[in-house]
Image: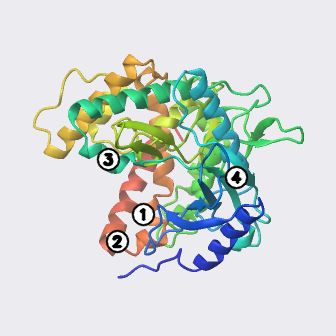
C-alpha cells in the first residue's frame, strides 16, 4: 500500500514563508534548497530545513544561511516553547563546546521567532530559526565509508563533544527539570519539555510520571490498544503513576541530578567534512532538555552502540555493565559489527571522561521504566502509517508482547 506524502501539501506556502523571513532582514536570496527533505515521506517532518544562498553576505563573509521552520503538524511534540527551547539549548551547547576548547560546531543563531499561533496550524504561523550553515555531509552516511583509523578518530571527536556537553553549566536561572525558554529579561529559564506536554518538574520521578501518563493517554487513541481497557490493566497503570510507583521503581537513582541533554545525539545530527575528516556541525536541539543525564542514552547513540533502547541483548548487557571484555560467542555478522562499534565507542568515551550508562547509578531501573513506558503505547500500534504496514497477526503479537511486559513490571513492583 502506497503511503500518503503528508509533507507535500503546503510546500509552496512554506517557500513563501522562507522568502518573507529572508526579506525582513533586508536580504535577498539567490537560491533556496531543501535539506533532509523526502517528498514521499509518510510522517510529518519535525522541521522543514532550507539552505539559502544569498546575493550579499549575511555576516562573517558567509553567503549561505539555514532557515528552519518548526512544523506545527509534527506528531507528539509540544509547541508551547519549542523554538525558544531550540535556541536556548544551542546557546548552552555552544558555550560548553567553547569551554572545552573545541572547534565550534554548533551553528550560530542569527535570528528566531516563536510560532504566531499554535492553535491555527498554517505555514505562516510556524516558528523559525535562521542560523549558520555548516558545510559538510551527514555523518551517518559517511561513517560506514571510513577506514578503521578514520572511524577511530571520529569516535574520539564524538567523545570529546559528548564530554563537553555533559559538563555544560546549567544556568542558575534554570532550577527545574524540563525544557527551556527566555524570561522578559532574556534569562534562560525552565519551561515545558518538547517531548512532554507538562512541566517543568521538581524531580526526575515527576518527569517519568508525566511521560507515563502521556503514553497511557495516547494508548486510548489506538484502535488496537483501546487504552488497555479490555485487558484490565489500565487502573493498575494509573495507580502506579499516582501512588508514587515511579519513585519506588527508581530507588537508588539520583532524582535531583540535572544536566543538559541534547536528546538526539546520533550521527544523523552531525555534519562531517570529507576533506578534513572532522565533524564540523552538531545540529537539531529540538528535543534538548535539562534532565537526568541517563536520558541521553535512551534516545541517542543508536548508530555507534551506546543506546540502551534497542541494542542486541549481548551488546546491551555490555553497555549497561560498561564491560566489553568478553565478546559473546557465535554472534551473527550484523551483531558482531554492532559489538565492535559499541566496544570502540566505549573505549573512546572512557579515554575522554564521558559518563556512560554503566557509570550511572540505577541505569538498569531507568531502562526498565523506559521499557514499561514503551510497552504502554508502542509506536507500531499507535502510529497510523506504521499500523498500516502490519498484518493482523503482527499487531496481535506486538500487543501480547507489550501486555506481558506491562503485567510483569507491575507485578514486580506490587501494583
Residue 380, disc: 1
Q: For this view, does 179 lie left or right of residue 62? A: right
- Counting residues from the start of the chain, the first of labels 4 and 2 encountered is 4
The mark closer to the camera, 3 or 4, is 3
**What is the spatial separation of the Cα atoms under label 2 and label 1, in whole angstroms?**
8 Å
191 over 324 or under it: above or below:
below
Helix, strand or loop at label 1? It is helix
**What is the spatial separation of the Cα atoms under label 4 and label 2, in whole angstroms?**
35 Å
Q: For this view, does 105 lie left or right of residue 267? A: right
Helix, strand or loop at label 4? It is helix
**What is the spatial separation of the Cα atoms under label 1 and label 4, in whole angstroms?**
28 Å
- Badge 1: few (under 14), some or many (20 or more) residues near its Cα, within 10 Å? some
Q: Residue shown at 67%/46% (left/top)?
A: 59
The mark closer to the camera, 4 or 2, is 4
Q: Residue shown at 60%/37% (left/top)?
A: 245
Helix, strand or loop at label 3? It is helix
In the image, 79 versus 88, the foreground residue is 88
Image marks 2 and 1: residues in contact by CB distance under 8 Å: yes
- Counting residues from the start of the chain, the first of labels 3 and 4 encountered is 4
- Name the residue beneath numbered marker 4: 83
- Counting residues from the start of the chain, the first of labels 2 and 3 encountered is 3
- Name the residue beneath numbered marker 3: 142
- Badge 3: few (under 14), some or many (20 or more) residues near its Cα, within 10 Å? some
Q: Quadrant of residue 96?
A: top right
65 over 14 or under it: above or below:
above
- Name the residue beneath numbered marker 2: 390
- Counting residues from the start of the chain, the first of labels 1 and 4 encountered is 4
379 over 97 or under it: above or below:
below
- Counting residues from the start of the chain, the first of labels 2 and 1 encountered is 1
Amino acid at each position: 500500500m502506497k503511503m500518503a506524502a503528508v509533507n507535500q501539501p503546503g510546500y509552496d506556502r512554506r517557500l513563501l514563508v522562507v522568502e518573507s523571513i529572508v526579506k525582513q532582514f533586508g536580504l535577498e536570496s539567490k537560491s533556496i534548497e531543501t535539506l533532509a527533505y523526502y517528498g514521499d515521506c509518510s510522517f510529518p517532518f519535525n522541521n522543514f530545513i532550507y539552505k539559502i544562498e544569498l546575493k550579499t553576505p549575511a555576516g562573517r563573509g558567509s553567503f549561505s544561511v539555514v532557515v528552519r521552520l518548526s512544523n506545527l503538524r509534527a506528531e507528539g511534540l509540544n509547541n508551547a516553547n519549542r523554538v525558544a527551547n531550540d535556541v536556548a539549548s544551542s546557546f548552552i551547547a555552544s558555550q560548553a563546546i567553547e569551554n572545552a576548547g573545541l572547534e565550534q560546531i554548533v551553528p550560530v543563531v542569527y535570528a528566531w521567532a516563536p510560532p504566531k499561533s499554535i492553535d491555527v496550524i498554517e505555514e505562516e504561523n510556524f516558528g523559525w530559526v535562521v542560523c549558520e550553515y555548516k558545510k559538510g555531509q551527514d555523518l551517518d552516511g559517511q561513517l560506514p565509508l571510513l577506514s578503521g583509523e578514520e572511524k577511530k578518530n571520529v569516535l574520539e571527536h564524538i567523545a570529546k563533544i559528548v564530554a563537553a556537553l555533559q559538563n555544560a553549566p546549567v544556568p542558575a536561572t534554570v532550577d527545574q527539570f524540563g525544557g527551556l525558554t527566555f524570561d522578559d529579561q532574556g534569562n534562560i529559564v525552565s519551561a515545558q519539555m518538547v517531548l512532554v506536554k507538562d512541566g517543568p518538574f521538581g524531580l526526575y520521578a515527576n518527569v517519568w510520571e508525566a511521560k507515563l501518563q502521556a503514553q497511557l493517554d495516547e494508548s486510548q487513541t489506538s484502535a488496537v490498544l483501546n487504552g488497555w481497557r479490555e485487558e484490565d490493566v489500565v487502573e493498575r497503570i494509573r495507580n502506579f503513576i499516582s501512588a508514587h510507583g515511579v519513585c519506588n521503581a527508581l530507588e537508588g537513582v539520583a532524582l535531583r541530578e540535572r544536566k543538559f541533554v541534547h536528546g538526539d545525539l546520533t550521527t544523523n545530527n552531525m555534519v562531517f567534512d570529507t576533506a578534513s575528516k572532522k565533524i564540523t556541525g552538531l545540529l537539531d536541539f529540538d528535543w534538548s532538555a535539562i534532565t537526568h543525564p541517563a536520558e541521553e542514552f535512551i534516545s541517542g547513540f543508536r548508530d555507534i552502540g551506546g543506546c540502551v533502547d534497542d541494542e542486541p541483548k549481548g551488546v546491551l548487557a555490555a553497555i549497561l555493565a560498561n564491560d566489553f571484555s568478553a565478546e559473546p560467542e557465535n554472534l551473527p555478522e550484523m551483531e558482531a559489527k554492532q559489538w565492535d562499534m559499541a566496544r570502540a565507542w566505549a573505549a573512546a568515551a572512557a579515554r575522554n571522561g564521558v559518563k556512560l550508562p554503566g557509570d550511572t547509578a540505577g541505569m538498569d531501573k531507568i531502562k526498565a521504566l523506559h521499557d514499561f513506558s514503551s510497552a504502554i503505547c508502542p509506536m507500531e500500534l499507535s502510529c497510523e502509517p506504521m499500523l498500516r504496514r502490519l498484518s493482523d497477526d503482527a499487531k496481535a503479537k506486538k500487543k501480547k508482547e507489550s501486555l506481558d511486559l506491562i503485567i510483569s513490571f507491575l507485578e514486580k513492583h506490587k501494583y
